[in-house]
Amino acid sequence: MHREHELHNRRWGRNLGVALTLAAFIALVFGLTIAKVQRGDSMQAADHTYRSGLDPATRAPVEPVE
Amino acid sequence: MSDIQADITAQSRTGEAGFGDYVQLLKPRVMSLVVFTALVGLMVAPVSLHPIEALAAIIFIALGGGASGALNMWWDADIDRVMKRTAKRPVPAGTVQAGEALALGLALSGISVVMLGLATNLLAAGLLAFTIFFYAVVYTMWLKRSTPQNIVIGGAAGAFPPMIGWAAATGSISLESVLMFMLIFMWTPPHFWALALFMNSDYSKAKVPMLTVTHGRKVTRTHILVYTIALAPVAVGAAFTSIGGPIYLAVSLLLNALFLLGAWRIWRRPEEAAEADKYAVERRFFALSLAYLFGHFAAFMIEAMPFADTVSAALGWGF
Protein backbone atom coordinates (compact mmCIF):
# COMPACT_ATOMS: atom_id res chain seq x y z
CA MET A 1 0.00 0.00 0.00
CA HIS A 2 1.24 3.47 -0.86
CA ARG A 3 1.31 5.69 2.22
CA GLU A 4 0.79 9.42 1.70
CA HIS A 5 3.51 11.67 3.06
CA GLU A 6 2.39 13.99 5.86
CA LEU A 7 3.17 16.95 3.58
CA HIS A 8 0.69 15.72 0.98
CA ASN A 9 -2.01 15.25 3.60
CA ARG A 10 -1.48 18.80 4.81
CA ARG A 11 -1.53 20.15 1.27
CA TRP A 12 -4.78 18.23 0.59
CA GLY A 13 -6.32 19.64 3.76
CA ARG A 14 -5.32 23.16 2.80
CA ASN A 15 -6.71 22.83 -0.73
CA LEU A 16 -9.96 21.40 0.62
CA GLY A 17 -10.20 24.25 3.13
CA VAL A 18 -9.71 26.88 0.41
CA ALA A 19 -12.24 25.14 -1.87
CA LEU A 20 -14.88 24.99 0.87
CA THR A 21 -14.24 28.62 1.83
CA LEU A 22 -14.68 29.73 -1.79
CA ALA A 23 -17.83 27.62 -2.18
CA ALA A 24 -19.26 29.18 1.00
CA PHE A 25 -18.39 32.66 -0.27
CA ILE A 26 -20.14 32.01 -3.61
CA ALA A 27 -23.21 30.63 -1.82
CA LEU A 28 -23.30 33.70 0.44
CA VAL A 29 -23.05 36.17 -2.45
CA PHE A 30 -25.75 34.22 -4.33
CA GLY A 31 -28.01 34.29 -1.27
CA LEU A 32 -27.41 38.01 -0.80
CA THR A 33 -28.30 38.68 -4.43
CA ILE A 34 -31.55 36.71 -4.13
CA ALA A 35 -32.45 38.52 -0.89
CA LYS A 36 -31.84 41.95 -2.41
CA VAL A 37 -33.63 41.19 -5.69
CA GLN A 38 -36.66 39.78 -3.85
CA ARG A 39 -36.89 42.98 -1.83
CA GLY A 40 -36.85 45.04 -5.01
CA ASP A 41 -33.52 46.83 -4.40
CA SER A 42 -32.12 48.76 -7.32
CA MET A 43 -29.82 46.39 -9.17
CA GLN A 44 -28.56 48.97 -11.66
CA ALA A 45 -26.07 51.77 -11.14
CA ALA A 46 -24.73 54.61 -13.29
CA ASP A 47 -22.10 53.43 -15.77
CA HIS A 48 -21.90 56.53 -17.98
CA THR A 49 -24.52 55.33 -20.45
CA TYR A 50 -28.24 56.10 -20.48
CA ARG A 51 -30.29 53.54 -18.54
CA SER A 52 -34.00 53.96 -18.84
CA GLY A 53 -34.44 51.91 -15.69
CA LEU A 54 -32.64 54.61 -13.68
CA ASP A 55 -34.55 57.52 -15.23
CA PRO A 56 -37.30 58.64 -12.81
CA ALA A 57 -39.28 59.99 -15.76
CA THR A 58 -39.56 56.59 -17.43
CA ARG A 59 -39.32 54.21 -14.46
CA ALA A 60 -42.49 52.31 -13.63
CA PRO A 61 -43.28 51.90 -9.91
CA VAL A 62 -41.89 48.65 -8.51
CA GLU A 63 -44.55 46.23 -7.31
CA PRO A 64 -43.61 44.56 -4.04
CA VAL A 65 -43.08 40.81 -4.35
CA GLU A 66 -45.65 38.74 -2.45
CA MET B 1 14.62 7.22 8.66
CA SER B 2 17.12 8.24 5.95
CA ASP B 3 18.79 11.64 5.91
CA ILE B 4 16.73 12.67 2.88
CA GLN B 5 13.46 11.69 4.54
CA ALA B 6 14.45 13.55 7.69
CA ASP B 7 15.24 16.62 5.61
CA ILE B 8 11.88 16.48 3.79
CA THR B 9 10.03 16.10 7.09
CA ALA B 10 11.88 19.04 8.63
CA GLN B 11 11.17 21.20 5.59
CA SER B 12 7.52 20.22 5.50
CA ARG B 13 7.07 21.25 9.13
CA THR B 14 8.45 24.71 8.58
CA GLY B 15 7.81 25.38 4.90
CA GLU B 16 4.15 24.64 4.27
CA ALA B 17 1.35 25.62 6.56
CA GLY B 18 -1.90 23.70 6.91
CA PHE B 19 -5.33 25.35 6.61
CA GLY B 20 -5.62 25.43 10.40
CA ASP B 21 -2.44 27.50 10.67
CA TYR B 22 -4.03 30.24 8.57
CA VAL B 23 -7.19 30.04 10.68
CA GLN B 24 -4.99 30.54 13.78
CA LEU B 25 -3.67 33.77 12.22
CA LEU B 26 -7.21 35.18 12.47
CA LYS B 27 -7.26 34.74 16.28
CA PRO B 28 -10.43 32.57 16.40
CA ARG B 29 -11.00 33.16 20.13
CA VAL B 30 -11.03 36.93 19.65
CA MET B 31 -13.23 36.42 16.58
CA SER B 32 -15.79 34.55 18.69
CA LEU B 33 -16.11 37.60 20.95
CA VAL B 34 -16.40 39.85 17.88
CA VAL B 35 -19.12 37.61 16.42
CA PHE B 36 -21.08 37.54 19.67
CA THR B 37 -20.99 41.30 20.37
CA ALA B 38 -21.65 42.22 16.72
CA LEU B 39 -24.59 39.79 16.65
CA VAL B 40 -26.04 41.42 19.76
CA GLY B 41 -25.57 44.90 18.24
CA LEU B 42 -27.42 43.70 15.16
CA MET B 43 -30.22 41.93 17.02
CA VAL B 44 -31.06 44.69 19.50
CA ALA B 45 -31.26 47.32 16.74
CA PRO B 46 -34.78 48.62 16.06
CA VAL B 47 -34.47 47.74 12.34
CA SER B 48 -34.27 44.09 11.31
CA LEU B 49 -32.23 42.81 8.38
CA HIS B 50 -33.03 39.94 6.04
CA PRO B 51 -31.53 36.80 7.69
CA ILE B 52 -29.03 36.34 4.84
CA GLU B 53 -27.96 39.98 5.05
CA ALA B 54 -27.54 39.59 8.82
CA LEU B 55 -25.50 36.41 8.33
CA ALA B 56 -23.32 38.13 5.72
CA ALA B 57 -22.83 41.15 8.02
CA ILE B 58 -21.70 38.95 10.92
CA ILE B 59 -19.36 36.90 8.69
CA PHE B 60 -17.71 39.98 7.19
CA ILE B 61 -17.39 41.76 10.55
CA ALA B 62 -15.74 38.59 11.91
CA LEU B 63 -13.50 38.38 8.84
CA GLY B 64 -12.46 42.03 9.35
CA GLY B 65 -11.62 41.22 12.97
CA GLY B 66 -9.61 38.21 11.78
CA ALA B 67 -7.78 40.35 9.23
CA SER B 68 -6.63 42.77 11.93
CA GLY B 69 -5.49 39.74 13.98
CA ALA B 70 -3.34 38.54 11.06
CA LEU B 71 -1.83 42.01 10.65
CA ASN B 72 -1.13 42.08 14.39
CA MET B 73 0.66 38.71 14.18
CA TRP B 74 2.71 39.91 11.21
CA TRP B 75 3.91 43.04 13.01
CA ASP B 76 4.33 41.53 16.47
CA ALA B 77 6.15 38.32 15.47
CA ASP B 78 9.32 39.48 17.27
CA ILE B 79 7.64 39.99 20.65
CA ASP B 80 5.30 37.01 20.22
CA ARG B 81 8.43 34.85 19.90
CA VAL B 82 9.65 36.01 23.33
CA MET B 83 6.39 35.67 25.25
CA LYS B 84 5.39 32.21 26.51
CA ARG B 85 1.68 32.91 25.94
CA THR B 86 2.20 33.72 22.23
CA ALA B 87 5.31 31.73 21.22
CA LYS B 88 3.23 29.00 19.57
CA ARG B 89 1.42 31.38 17.20
CA PRO B 90 1.96 30.44 13.53
CA VAL B 91 4.51 33.14 12.63
CA PRO B 92 6.86 32.81 15.65
CA ALA B 93 6.46 29.02 15.48
CA GLY B 94 7.63 29.11 11.83
CA THR B 95 4.59 27.41 10.29
CA VAL B 96 3.50 30.55 8.42
CA GLN B 97 5.85 33.15 6.91
CA ALA B 98 5.48 36.75 8.12
CA GLY B 99 4.82 37.89 4.53
CA GLU B 100 1.95 35.42 4.22
CA ALA B 101 0.36 36.83 7.38
CA LEU B 102 0.65 40.34 5.94
CA ALA B 103 -0.83 39.28 2.59
CA LEU B 104 -3.71 37.42 4.23
CA GLY B 105 -4.40 40.36 6.57
CA LEU B 106 -4.46 42.91 3.75
CA ALA B 107 -6.54 40.73 1.42
CA LEU B 108 -9.14 39.89 4.07
CA SER B 109 -9.30 43.56 5.17
CA GLY B 110 -10.21 44.61 1.62
CA ILE B 111 -12.67 41.77 1.06
CA SER B 112 -14.44 42.21 4.41
CA VAL B 113 -14.85 46.00 4.12
CA VAL B 114 -16.05 45.94 0.48
CA MET B 115 -18.41 43.01 1.06
CA LEU B 116 -19.87 44.52 4.25
CA GLY B 117 -20.50 47.74 2.33
CA LEU B 118 -22.26 45.82 -0.47
CA ALA B 119 -24.23 43.61 1.90
CA THR B 120 -25.38 46.38 4.27
CA ASN B 121 -24.31 50.03 4.05
CA LEU B 122 -21.32 52.35 3.77
CA LEU B 123 -21.37 53.47 7.42
CA ALA B 124 -20.94 49.91 8.65
CA ALA B 125 -18.15 49.33 6.09
CA GLY B 126 -16.44 52.60 7.10
CA LEU B 127 -16.58 51.67 10.79
CA LEU B 128 -15.12 48.23 10.02
CA ALA B 129 -12.29 49.81 7.97
CA PHE B 130 -11.57 52.22 10.83
CA THR B 131 -11.58 49.35 13.35
CA ILE B 132 -9.02 47.37 11.32
CA PHE B 133 -6.86 50.50 10.92
CA PHE B 134 -7.16 51.32 14.62
CA TYR B 135 -6.17 47.82 15.77
CA ALA B 136 -3.41 47.20 13.23
CA VAL B 137 -1.84 50.65 13.01
CA VAL B 138 -2.83 52.76 16.04
CA TYR B 139 -2.70 49.96 18.63
CA THR B 140 -0.28 47.34 17.23
CA MET B 141 2.26 49.52 15.45
CA TRP B 142 2.14 52.59 17.65
CA LEU B 143 0.61 52.42 21.13
CA LYS B 144 1.47 48.86 22.18
CA ARG B 145 5.22 49.48 22.33
CA SER B 146 5.18 53.14 23.32
CA THR B 147 2.81 53.78 26.23
CA PRO B 148 1.51 51.97 29.33
CA GLN B 149 -1.94 53.27 28.35
CA ASN B 150 -1.73 50.99 25.26
CA ILE B 151 -4.68 48.79 26.10
CA VAL B 152 -6.82 51.70 27.32
CA ILE B 153 -6.83 53.42 23.93
CA GLY B 154 -6.30 50.22 21.94
CA GLY B 155 -9.36 48.73 23.63
CA ALA B 156 -11.48 50.90 21.35
CA ALA B 157 -10.77 48.47 18.50
CA GLY B 158 -12.44 45.62 20.39
CA ALA B 159 -15.35 47.86 21.33
CA PHE B 160 -16.46 48.65 17.78
CA PRO B 161 -18.14 45.34 16.69
CA PRO B 162 -21.54 45.93 18.40
CA MET B 163 -21.55 49.46 16.99
CA ILE B 164 -20.84 48.03 13.51
CA GLY B 165 -23.64 45.47 13.96
CA TRP B 166 -26.03 48.27 14.96
CA ALA B 167 -24.89 50.42 12.01
CA ALA B 168 -25.32 47.47 9.61
CA ALA B 169 -28.99 47.22 10.64
CA THR B 170 -29.90 50.89 11.07
CA GLY B 171 -27.36 52.78 8.96
CA SER B 172 -26.72 55.11 11.89
CA ILE B 173 -24.98 55.59 15.24
CA SER B 174 -27.08 56.23 18.34
CA LEU B 175 -26.85 56.51 22.13
CA GLU B 176 -27.48 52.77 22.45
CA SER B 177 -24.63 51.78 20.14
CA VAL B 178 -22.30 54.27 21.84
CA LEU B 179 -23.19 52.73 25.24
CA MET B 180 -22.41 49.22 23.95
CA PHE B 181 -19.09 50.60 22.68
CA MET B 182 -18.37 52.28 26.04
CA LEU B 183 -19.20 49.10 27.94
CA ILE B 184 -16.45 47.13 26.15
CA PHE B 185 -14.09 50.12 26.07
CA MET B 186 -14.25 50.64 29.86
CA TRP B 187 -14.18 46.88 30.53
CA THR B 188 -10.96 46.25 28.56
CA PRO B 189 -8.42 47.86 30.96
CA PRO B 190 -9.40 45.93 34.13
CA HIS B 191 -9.67 42.73 32.03
CA PHE B 192 -6.16 43.02 30.53
CA TRP B 193 -4.47 44.47 33.62
CA ALA B 194 -5.71 41.50 35.66
CA LEU B 195 -4.09 39.26 33.02
CA ALA B 196 -0.91 41.36 33.14
CA LEU B 197 -0.70 40.94 36.93
CA PHE B 198 -0.22 37.20 36.62
CA MET B 199 1.58 37.21 33.21
CA ASN B 200 3.92 40.09 34.10
CA SER B 201 7.18 38.28 33.32
CA ASP B 202 6.05 37.73 29.71
CA TYR B 203 5.55 41.46 29.11
CA SER B 204 8.84 42.32 30.88
CA LYS B 205 10.79 39.91 28.67
CA ALA B 206 9.19 41.30 25.52
CA LYS B 207 9.78 44.90 26.71
CA VAL B 208 6.10 45.75 26.20
CA PRO B 209 5.39 48.75 28.46
CA MET B 210 2.38 47.31 30.25
CA LEU B 211 1.35 49.28 33.32
CA THR B 212 2.64 46.45 35.54
CA VAL B 213 6.10 46.83 33.97
CA THR B 214 6.35 50.64 33.91
CA HIS B 215 4.47 51.66 37.08
CA GLY B 216 4.45 48.47 39.14
CA ARG B 217 1.74 46.21 40.44
CA LYS B 218 0.45 48.49 43.20
CA VAL B 219 -0.40 51.23 40.70
CA THR B 220 -1.96 48.63 38.36
CA ARG B 221 -4.18 47.37 41.18
CA THR B 222 -5.37 50.93 41.83
CA HIS B 223 -6.05 51.45 38.11
CA ILE B 224 -8.13 48.26 37.98
CA LEU B 225 -10.30 49.52 40.85
CA VAL B 226 -10.71 53.02 39.33
CA TYR B 227 -11.72 51.70 35.91
CA THR B 228 -14.11 49.16 37.45
CA ILE B 229 -15.80 51.97 39.42
CA ALA B 230 -16.03 54.10 36.25
CA LEU B 231 -17.42 51.14 34.28
CA ALA B 232 -20.36 50.48 36.63
CA PRO B 233 -22.52 53.55 35.80
CA VAL B 234 -21.98 53.00 32.06
CA ALA B 235 -23.08 49.36 32.32
CA VAL B 236 -26.04 50.00 34.62
CA GLY B 237 -27.06 53.16 32.75
CA ALA B 238 -27.69 51.17 29.57
CA ALA B 239 -30.66 49.59 31.37
CA PHE B 240 -32.58 52.86 30.97
CA THR B 241 -32.27 53.05 27.18
CA SER B 242 -34.29 51.26 24.48
CA ILE B 243 -31.94 48.23 24.55
CA GLY B 244 -32.19 47.78 28.33
CA GLY B 245 -34.98 46.79 30.69
CA PRO B 246 -35.64 45.20 34.08
CA ILE B 247 -33.96 41.88 33.21
CA TYR B 248 -30.82 43.65 32.02
CA LEU B 249 -30.87 45.90 35.09
CA ALA B 250 -30.98 42.91 37.46
CA VAL B 251 -28.15 41.13 35.60
CA SER B 252 -26.05 44.30 35.43
CA LEU B 253 -26.48 45.16 39.13
CA LEU B 254 -25.42 41.64 40.14
CA LEU B 255 -22.43 41.50 37.78
CA ASN B 256 -21.23 44.99 38.72
CA ALA B 257 -21.48 44.19 42.43
CA LEU B 258 -19.33 41.07 41.88
CA PHE B 259 -16.89 42.92 39.62
CA LEU B 260 -16.49 45.79 42.10
CA LEU B 261 -15.96 43.32 44.94
CA GLY B 262 -13.28 41.53 42.88
CA ALA B 263 -11.54 44.80 42.00
CA TRP B 264 -11.59 45.89 45.64
CA ARG B 265 -10.05 42.55 46.69
CA ILE B 266 -7.32 43.00 44.09
CA TRP B 267 -6.67 46.59 45.23
CA ARG B 268 -6.26 45.83 48.93
CA ARG B 269 -4.10 42.76 48.37
CA PRO B 270 -0.36 42.94 49.17
CA GLU B 271 1.97 41.51 46.54
CA GLU B 272 3.33 38.88 48.92
CA ALA B 273 -0.15 37.41 49.40
CA ALA B 274 -0.67 37.29 45.62
CA GLU B 275 2.63 35.50 45.08
CA ALA B 276 1.84 33.07 47.90
CA ASP B 277 -1.37 31.82 46.24
CA LYS B 278 -0.07 32.25 42.67
CA TYR B 279 -2.42 35.16 41.91
CA ALA B 280 -5.58 33.18 42.60
CA VAL B 281 -7.69 36.32 43.21
CA GLU B 282 -6.39 37.98 40.01
CA ARG B 283 -7.06 34.83 37.98
CA ARG B 284 -10.61 34.63 39.38
CA PHE B 285 -11.15 38.30 38.53
CA PHE B 286 -9.94 37.67 34.97
CA ALA B 287 -12.39 34.76 34.58
CA LEU B 288 -15.15 36.90 36.11
CA SER B 289 -14.41 39.68 33.61
CA LEU B 290 -15.24 37.29 30.75
CA ALA B 291 -18.51 36.29 32.42
CA TYR B 292 -19.21 40.00 33.08
CA LEU B 293 -19.05 40.94 29.40
CA PHE B 294 -20.88 37.84 28.21
CA GLY B 295 -23.61 38.36 30.84
CA HIS B 296 -24.25 41.97 29.85
CA PHE B 297 -24.51 41.23 26.13
CA ALA B 298 -26.62 38.12 26.73
CA ALA B 299 -28.96 40.32 28.80
CA PHE B 300 -29.20 42.82 25.92
CA MET B 301 -30.16 39.93 23.66
CA ILE B 302 -32.81 38.67 26.12
CA GLU B 303 -34.29 42.17 26.32
CA ALA B 304 -34.71 42.11 22.51
CA MET B 305 -36.91 38.99 22.70
CA PRO B 306 -40.72 39.38 22.67
CA PHE B 307 -41.31 37.96 26.18
CA ALA B 308 -39.10 40.70 27.69
CA ASP B 309 -41.79 43.25 26.80
CA THR B 310 -44.30 41.24 28.84
CA VAL B 311 -41.93 41.26 31.82
CA SER B 312 -41.38 45.02 31.46
CA ALA B 313 -45.14 45.65 31.27
CA ALA B 314 -45.83 43.42 34.29
CA LEU B 315 -43.26 45.36 36.33
CA GLY B 316 -44.52 48.73 35.10
CA TRP B 317 -41.13 49.51 33.53
CA GLY B 318 -41.45 53.02 32.09
CA PHE B 319 -38.09 53.63 30.36
Image: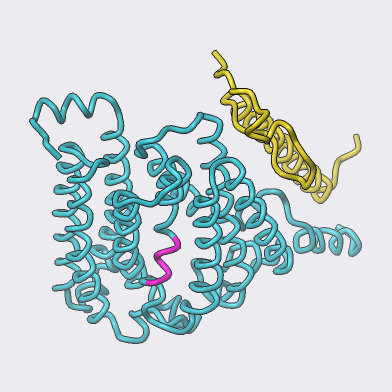
Q: Nearer the viewer, residue B239 or A1?
A: B239
Q: Residue furthest bottom?
A: B214
Say left or right for B225 vs A65. left
Q: Which residues are magenta?
A: B153-157
Where does residue B143 sit, x and y in percent of width and height?
46, 78
**Image quadrant assignment for residue B154:** bottom left
Say left or right for B60 vs B273. right
Vertical comparison of B223 with B118: above or below = below
Q: Is residue B127 magenta?
A: no
Q: Residue at x 26, y 60 (%)?
A: B285
Say left or right for B181 vs A1. left
Quadrant position of the N terminus of chain B in the picture: bottom right
Where does residue B188 sit, x and y in percent of width and height?
34, 63
Numbered marks: total = 0
Say left or right for B287 vs B112. left
Is residue B9 visible in the rendered image? The answer is yes
Q: Residue at x 78, y 58 (%)?
A: B16
Is residue B21 visible in the rendered image? The answer is no
Q: Residue furthest left?
A: B316
Q: Residue at x 58, y 47 (%)?
A: B117
Q: Nearer the viewer, residue B84 or B259?
A: B259
Q: Is residue B154 magenta?
A: yes
Where does residue B293 sit, x and y in percent of width and height?
31, 51
Where does residue B288 sit, x and y in percent of width and height?
27, 54
Q: Which chain is yellow?
A: A
Magenta: main secondary structure equals: helix
Vertical comparison of B270 with B107: above or below = below
Quadrant position of the C terminus of chain B in the picture: top left
**Image quadrant assignment for residue B250:** top left
Q: Which chain is cyan?
A: B
